[in-house]
Amino acid sequence: MKPSIRIGCGAGFSGDRLEPALVLVQQGELAYLVLECLAERTIALAQKRKRQDATLGYDPLLERRIETLLPHLLEKKVRLITNMGAANPLAAAQKIVDIAQRLSLSVTVAAVTGDDVFSLISGSETALETSKPLSDSGPLVSANAYMGIDAILPALATDADIIITGRVADPSLFLAPLVHAFGWSLEDFDQLGQGTVVGHLLECAGQLTGGYFADPGRKDVPDMAHLGHPFADVSADGTAIFGKVAGTGGVLSLATAKEQLLYEVMDPSRYITPDVVADFTQVRLTATGPNQVRASGARGQARPDTLKVSVGYEAGFIGEGEISYAGSNALNRAKLAGAIIQERLQDRFSDLRIDYIGSTSVHRTNFGHFPDPYEIRLRVAGKAQTAQQAALVGEEVEALYTNGPAGGGGARKYIHELVGIVSTLINRNQLTPQVTLFHA
Amino acid sequence: MTIKLYDIAHSRAGDKGNTLTLSLIPYTAEDYPLLCAQVTAEAVKQHLAEIVSGEITRYELPNLPALQFVCQQALTGGVTTSLTMDTHGKSLSYALLEMCIQS
């Protein structure tokens, strides 16, 4: 058994930057690279793409990421674990094989499936958010259960260079290789809790190394343009030392680690994953060198019998329109424009929102102690059943040019399709995780 | 003396459905008791009255040290269907840091 293994995280969301993962593979001396690319809603959108074309439904950036990384992963013998399979891990694995053949490379890919439980959901199950039946939210389009390490471990036991999954809990992507490498018991919940903290700290990639942290003059971060993504050297007892590749930008400090440890955590003493109920309250973070932090002390309790299921539903369309006002009395002219739009659209939209960008649009208040801005942007958003109706919002905002207050400029209009997400629980023994191997 | 939380602490916001999480981390551990004493769940509820309509729960993490606030019904329906600009509520860390306390 190795004294420690190094796992890097090269992507923390679907749209993450490509270069930091390449730097990690080339210079990071990794055993494993993880790319976490699947947010709550991403998989529902992917299911809709798969429905239109059965060969799609995986991460839109998969091709670019794999083309960039594959030669280097194979050369450096770094195993890749990623949830870029999204709604279609089998098609994603085939795509990777196609890319390898095009590049004359030999690769084995393991696709992990079983998270798609749409056929098991009737719609009558209770949504956790609304306490009403799932189908009350709207026409259902997808249902994916959060699988855990038990779905990934059989893939790691093969000789696959790349393990590609659909929906699994983010920390499980990191915990699985630790359990695989160190032979941890699936009943040793303190150990699994500690491994889950490692995964939680890494899963948002740059958010541990100074991304989403900088505040000039208060929390300064050097060379953000070349922000490096993190890795962890994890020992057999689960203690981990986090670092980043020398020469990359960013900072890894107690402050960045604390912000990330608590990120999206509801009850810190009960962080629930499919593998364990982790307790973060006893975690000890120690600065052990420049851009180096050690984490230890997490605990855990038995994993839950149920798995969370993310259920996507069609939520109609959103129409948006924006227009700017600047100079003297700008806020009042924007407010007049907002009142005009309200009157013109209120009969046709039950759900209409009017925001003043530059004043109260982001926090819905300015706490009453900021002066009026020099320029202001009116933003109107409305929900509609059809794209055609949603378009009315932008059309009315644009029409403020000749039918609204003085000095409006820079009108823009947008229409988006909305996919909503609700959750429910499913008994874990209803799932049958499977591994399918692909070779090139 | 009245100070803003921004002067002594930093924060990161996170979201789960319609629930907002806000960490509050003092730059120096010496300020942690001050935060515990004054930045109560009730005080934060009052400060964020126009943003959070549900319950706010505070968790203490003396090991770090840090506080964690979990705010229910804070994201006007949640990331996926909200009409607001910042559907995740990611910018709301800086709304918390606008809160004033006595040093």
Image (tube, helix red, strand yellow):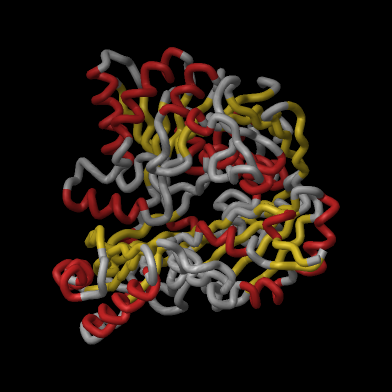
Q: Residue at x 35, y 52 (%)?
A: A43
Q: What percent of the width, then of the height, locates residue A13?
A: 44, 43
Q: Nearer the viewer, residue A41 or A326?
A: A326
Is residue A175 in view from this perspective? no
Q: What percent of the width, then of the height, locates residue A400?
A: 21, 71
In the image, residue A307 above or below residue B71: above
In the image, residue A130 above or below residue A421: below
Q: What percent of the width, then of the height, locates residue A102?
A: 23, 19
Looking at the image, residue B6 sits to the left or right of residue A248; the answer is right
Q: Nearer the viewer, residue A93 or B79?
A: B79
Looking at the image, residue A413 sits to the left or right of residue A287; the answer is left
Q: Residue at x 64, y 61 (%)?
A: B97
Q: Nearer the viewer, residue A402 or A416?
A: A402
Looking at the image, residue A28 sits to the left or right of residue A235; the answer is left
Specify the quadrant that holds the C terminus of chain A.
Answer: top left
In the image, residue A244 above or below residue A36: above
Q: Residue at x 78, y 62 (%)?
A: B35
Q: Quadrant of residue A138?
A: bottom left
In the image, residue A58 above or below residue A386: above
Q: Nearer the viewer, residue A247 or A413?
A: A413
Specify the quadrant that holds the N terminus of chain A.
Answer: top right
Looking at the image, residue B11 sits to the left or right of residue A113; the answer is right
Q: Quadrant of residue A313?
A: bottom left
Is residue A376 in view from this perspective? yes
Question: Residue lying furthest front in this view?
Answer: A328
Q: What percent of the width, then of the height, locates residue A333?
A: 33, 74
Q: How many marks?
A: 0
